[in-house]
Image (cartoon, rainbow, N blue to C red):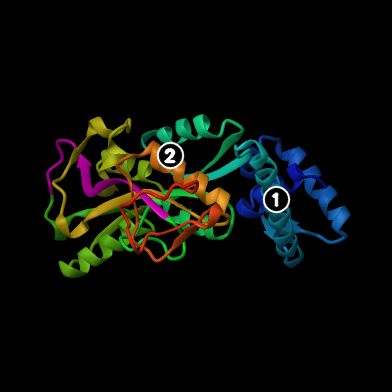
Amino acid sequence: MDFFELSAFLALARTLHFAKAAGQVNTSPSALSRIVVRLEEEAGVPLFERDTRRVVLTEEGRLFGDFAREVLRQKETLHETLASWKGSLRGALRVWASVTACYSILPPFAAQLRLSHPDLHLSIQTGDPAEAETALRNDEVDLALAALPEEGLSGLPSFSVKRSPLVFVMAKDAPRPAWEQATYILPSRGLARERFDRWSRTQKLKPSVVAETAGNEAILALARLGLGLGLVPRIVLDNSPFADGLEILPPLPELGEYDIGFAFYNRSPRFSQAVATVLEAAYPTGSWKSTAHTLHFEHGSSYSSSDSPNSALPDPSA
């Protein structure tokens, strides 16, 4: 087995879908199937149960997944150590981001990363923003770009880069209904859904939810068709092809704003220092969330965001 095969296995373990997993690792479903067979032969046990309709990870497969993640983590640690000899990180930085975040927020980070660490390339996984924290805590990614709770994410350094109000949208020229008579198109979970549920309880509404989705673009598409009021962060509309056919309702203070930013594991002094430096250079107006985490750097320096959430990280060479 090799590193690519382990990465391919983990992609299939995450998606449980050969075509999707193959796409993530840039191979074909048939090639991925052969990789799984080889890994099962080497392991001597079935890693997946599969037939024409479904793929299920076995208990042996779960154990193998832990092994694969640890091997790949050790590989990245080795790359990092070797790269320290010439002052630059190398390898892959795995980033979770929504499609909207990829074109509206991520570009400055990507540009600064390439400038600061030309041997470190981005591996971007797009998906439901509500799954970003889970992907980060499961070590599926190194960095997540997502909505941040006001208190930050427990145990994870978090850097806020943009705020965007949550707004309702509806088809242009459609009559605006009263809140209690409206139909709603909502995210199936996540921060926006939590805010909506709290608001509807406060308003004593029994909302008629006609659709739930895992992505904001789907909400916009359904709202444009006239199915109801869709709830999205305002930033989603800035570059959306559906924006022209939608009316944006005035923001409701009760729904608040999305605090959009990056979160990552403080997994090593060098990694944390590199990510923090790139974030601050890419987003000069950004700020660290006031959570009780501390970033530890080389030469014994450290930064605690609970002490000064808006201050810059210290120069480790000082």
Q: Nearer the viewer, residue 216 or 117?
A: 117
Q: How far across and how far down the image is residue 166, in percent?
A: 24, 50
Q: Residue 80 bears which disc, if any?
A: none
Q: Height in image: 296 above or below 1?
A: below
Pointer 2 local density, CA inside 10 Å: few below 14, some 14–19, many at least 20: some
Magenta run includes residue 273: no
Q: Give the spatial CA distance, label 2 vs label 1.
A: 26 Å
Note whether residue 225 is visible: no
Q: How far across and how far down the image is residue 252, in percent?
A: 15, 54
Q: How far across and how far down the image is residue 89, in percent?
A: 60, 40
Q: Residue at x 26, y 33 (%)?
A: 243
Q: Residue at x 40, y 66 (%)?
A: 292
Pointer 1 local density, CA inside 10 Å: few below 14, some 14–19, many at least 20: some
Secondary structure category for the residue under label 2: helix
Note whether residue 249 is visible: yes
Magenta-highlighted stretch: main secondary structure? Answer: strand
Give the residue pinned by disc 2.
99
Residue range of the region highlighted in magenta in the rendering: 158-176
Q: Height in image: 134 above or below 224?
A: below
Left or right of 302? Residue 176 is left
Magenta run includes residue 173: yes
Give the residue pinned by disc 1.
72
Q: How far across and how far down the image is residue 276, in percent?
A: 45, 47
Q: Nearer the viewer, residue 153 or 274?
A: 274
Frontmost of labels 2 and 1 is 1
Secondary structure category for the residue under label 1: helix
The amino acid pointed to by label 2 is Val
Residue 309, located in which quarter of the rendered image?
bottom left
